[in-house]
Amino acid sequence: MKKVKLLIFAFMALFLTTAAWVAADEEADTGIVTVVHGVPGLTVDVYVNGGLALPNFEPYTVTDPLTLPAGDYDIEIYPAGADPSATDPAIAGSTTLPAGANASIVAHLTEAGAPTLSVFVNDTSAINEGDARVVVRHTAAAPTVDVALTYKSDEIGKIESLSNPEEAQVEVGTGLYFASILPAGTDDVVAGPARFWLNPKFDRSYIIYAVGSLADGSFQLLVQTIDLDSIPVGDVTVIHGVPGLTVDVYVNGGLALPNFEPYTVTDPLTLPEGNYDIEIYPAGADPSATAPAIAGSAFLPGGANVSIVAHLTEAGTPTLSVFVNDVSEIDRGLSRLVMRHTAAAPTVDVSLFDRRTGDFVGTAEGLSNPNEVQLEVPRNRYLATIQPAGTDTVVFGPADLSLDPGFAYFVYAVGSLDDGSFTVLVQSVRLPSPAN
């Protein structure tokens, strides 16, 4: 399932313009401008600060980015070939280009159909690696609309009540999407579905402009792209191994996993690289008035696969441990088996047997809380038993482990031997295929 983070932005206005000379001092502060012509049936000449910048600029054209000195710009747009000294501009406006800014200047129609000029500041902040930013801008002669986004056959979100000249922003995983435009609050598609390929090879912002007029059939969509820096991401799995305690998990002060039940293993969560503070409270507790039952912090490196485990110490105290998972390539036909001791129990040995033949395979000796031992074994069905270190007394098992090739299996001993809550939880991760 594609993850989606929907952020609706109010119309941001403030700035800049187009033109044709970057002949200023090379050391002058600059900004970047893209010009979008969304007025149907009107080829124009664009003048900036009195000079002709874009002659014969045709409708439904998006310029390449222009690098301009920061400063104030007056923009006048005339029908192509018109004499500016004898003709009123069809559209006029002014703006300021701040140093370092990236902006789009859009000639378009108002909701009522009058030509106008709007300036948008483009969000060029870094995005999570593997995501794309989609910005939808309503710059058409059309009433307030909703924009439905579909990935494959699943609607992943709806941008609601977007009016001219407003914008809305969403960050999604890359892939093939469809966008449909509907009058606000209805299910009647008036444009689309339009197909958009968000290329997984690039971290980009895709800015989609609705231009033209719904009334006369000139309505269409234009796309501007901006290359962005990416924030490295990692994968996190959360394991709840504390018996009898349903919890709310807060991450960096925000509720992340409400009513998280014991002996649950989450699906992997993709998160940006960085530091995370984790506080775990009894479910429904007020964090401002209650001390956390468990607290800790973790750093997630970009590209890492990490497991965060709420569990008991050997003495039975709730705690938090973080394991970096080995998800490196494995030889064909093998499985990676990682045994982790996260239970209220003394140091143990873990013995492995072939389930079909009963043959002894091997023992991981002297495993203490919170440590792990790793094996690479042929794909098979195995039985695992747990016994106090150095003894033959089985205190748990045999547990049935069915291992497929090309996977890592992380097996957690959790709970307590003293009160009968001891059990094992399993997390699996598909590993990269060998090159040969």
Image (spheres, rainbow, N blue to C red):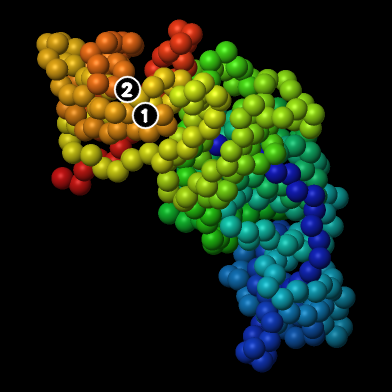
Say whether residue 399 is visible.
yes
Give the camera-side residue of 170 and 359: 359
Give the camera-side residue of 346 and 206: 346
345 to 47, vertically: above or below: above
Q: Give the side of residue 339 with respect to residue 219, left or right.
A: left
Residue 144 spot, x, y in % from top left: 80, 41
Q: Secondary structure at mark 1?
A: loop
Q: Earlier in the sequence, mark 1 or mark 2?
A: 2
Residue 293 spot, x, y in % from top left: 64, 26
Q: Give the side of residue 400 with respect to residue 285, left or right.
A: left
Amino acid type at circle 1 is Ser
Amino acid type at circle 2 is Val
Q: Seen from this angle, which residue lies furthest top?
A: 420
Residue 194 spot, x, y in % from top left: 57, 42
Density class for disc 1 (Cα within 10 Å; few <14, some 14-19, many ≥20) is many
Give the camera-side residue of 424 and 408: 424
- Residue at image x 64%, y 45%? 170
Density class for disc 2 (Cα within 10 Å; few <14, some 14-19, many ≥20) is many
298 to 122, vertically: above or below: above
- Residue at image x 73%, y 79%? 70
- Residue at image x 47%, y 17%? 415
Q: Give the side of residue 310 with respect to residue 338, left or right.
A: right
Q: Which mark is residue 348?
A: 2
Q: Are marks 1 and 2 in contact (CB under 8 Å)?
A: yes
- Residue at image x 70%, y 70%? 101
Cα–Cα span, label 1 and label 2: 6 Å
Q: Which mark is residue 368?
A: 1
Say whether residue 191 is visible.
no
Residue 254 spot, x, y in % from top left: 69, 36
